[in-house]
Image (cartoon, rainbow, N blue to C red):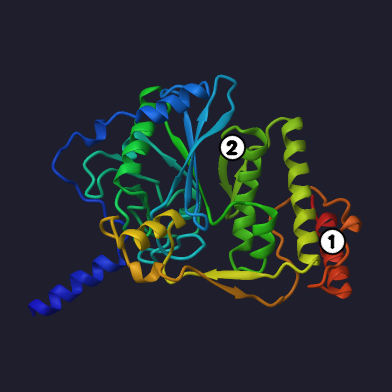
């Protein structure tokens, strides 16, 4: 009987997200922002009290910290390597799937846990309105210390101490919520071309709409949910035009990359990944990172699996017509003229179908 109970508890722990218990009260949450980071803020003309925004990328295993300046635009302040994330590229859909969320989340003062059993942490707010609209389940999805993950972003104790202090000071300065943008990878034409046959491509193209808006405006995009997808505020006419031009240019680059032979692939992880700097540390020091969840899953890195073309390149979302498709580069060694013509027809149809 005791053995059965023990096994049951172990299974429950394995299936849960990053359950964030409470340690006895400590003062670690009061640690100041490190002097080097304060100096970096000063050099960029921002202060600890200015608003922040964060962007996470699973494939690259990085979290970017952005600060808003006096001009109302966000500027990249610092990039932090992730020590561990779990699961695969793609959104979290259910409790126990070990997936780290992808989407647009809001970190609030109530999300902060100063007495976390994972040193310090803040909750991403999964499931958000979008997740709930799709019936997705799960809880306790966080950015935290340590190097162990069951659906969270683990940053090491040192890094979370700094991030926690930066978020804390932004809240003290009056910011009500910190937008946390979580992506499978950087939303470049190269990545979109390579992952074009992934089952999640429609969702990722929807995320890219918000990413594009931020890239163009350097302002926090307003985010809503309608018809099972994220929707973003259009802004004024000039902003909407600039975003549309970026999207059309990216689409042309994707088409050119595909036509020149860029293969369609899927990255398959044993169970998530970590930044290469931590992998090098583990190899060189034989550890040194404290608890690392499933280190055997990190040993080889992801497998790149070729995905044969099963139909047209997936297009999702409403966009301005894609112009200039006839100016695509000639097919390279990895493609055929028939494939090039097929892609031209796809992108011409994509433009004709837009509202």
For residue 25, what is the image quadrant? Answer: top left
State whether residue 197 appears in this view: yes
Depth check: give the residue in front, 291 or 308.
291
Cα–Cα gap, marks 1 and 2: 29 Å
Q: Badge 2 is on which residue? A: 221
Left or right: where does residue 124 sit relative to residue 90?
left
Residue 306: mark in rendering: none
Percent from the top left, x then y, of residue 233? 63, 37
State whether residue 46 appears in this view: no
- Residue at image location 34% in from the left, 55% down from the top: 139
- Residue at image location 89% in from the left, 52% down from the top: 324
**How many marks are shown on the rendered structure?**
2
Q: Badge 1 is on which residue? A: 349
**Extreme right residue here?**
326
Mark 2 neighbour class, 10 Å CA radius: few under 14, some 14 to 19, many 20 or more: many
N-terminal label among 1 and 2: 2
Left or right: where does residue 273 sit relative to residue 230?
left
For residue 159, what is the image quadrant? Answer: top left
- Residue at image location 35% in from the left, 36% down from the top: 162
What is the quadrant of the N terminus in the image? bottom left
Left or right: where does residue 144 sit relative to residue 224?
left
Mark 1 neighbour class, 10 Å CA radius: few under 14, some 14 to 19, many 20 or more: few
338 to 64, vertically: above or below: below
Left or right: where does residue 39 sit relative to residue 213?
left
């Amino acid at each position: 009987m005791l053995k059965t109970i023990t096994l049951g508890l172990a299974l429950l722990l394995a299936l849960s997200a990053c359950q964030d218990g409470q340690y006895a009260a400590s003062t670690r949450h009061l640690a100041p922002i490190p002097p080097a980071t304060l100096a970096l803020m000063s050099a960029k003309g921002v202060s600890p009290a200015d608003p922040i925004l964060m962007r996470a990328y699973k494939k690259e295993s990085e979290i970017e910290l952005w600060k808003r300046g006096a001009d109302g635009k966000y500027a990249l302040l610092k990039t932090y390597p992730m020590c561990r994330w779990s699961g695969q590229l793609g959104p979290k859909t259910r409790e126990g799937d070990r997936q780290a969320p992808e989407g647009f989340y809001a970190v609030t003062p109530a999300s902060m846990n100063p007495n976390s059993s994972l040193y310090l942490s803040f909750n991403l707010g999964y499931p958000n309105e979008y997740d709930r609209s799709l019936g997705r389940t799960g809880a306790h999805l966080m950015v935290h210390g340590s190097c162990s993950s069951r659906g969270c972003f683990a940053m090491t104790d040192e890094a979370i101490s700094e991030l926690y202090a930066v978020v804390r000071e932004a809240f003290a300065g009056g910011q009500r919520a910190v937008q946390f943008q979580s992506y499978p990878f950087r939303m470049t034409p190269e990545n979109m071309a390579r992952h074009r046959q992934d089952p999640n491509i429609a969702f990722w193209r929807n995320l890219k709409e918000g990413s594009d808006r931020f890239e163009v405006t350097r302002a926090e995009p307003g985010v809503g949910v309608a018809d099972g997808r994220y929707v973003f505020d259009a802004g004024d006419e000039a902003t909407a035009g600039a975003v549309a031009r970026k999207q059309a240019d990216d689409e042309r680059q994707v088409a050119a990359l595909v036509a020149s032979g860029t293969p369609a692939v899927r990255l398959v992880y044993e169970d998530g990944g970590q930044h290469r700097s931590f992998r090098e540390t583990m190899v060189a020091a034989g550890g040194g990172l404290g608890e690392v969840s499933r280190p055997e899953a990190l040993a080889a890195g992801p497998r790149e699996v070729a995905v044969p073309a099963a139909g047209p390149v997936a297009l999702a979302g409403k966009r301005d017509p894609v112009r200039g498709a006839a100016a695509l580069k000639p097919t390279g060694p990895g493609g055929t003229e028939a494939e090039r013509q097929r892609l031209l027809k796809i992108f011409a149809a994509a433009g004709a179908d837009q509202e």
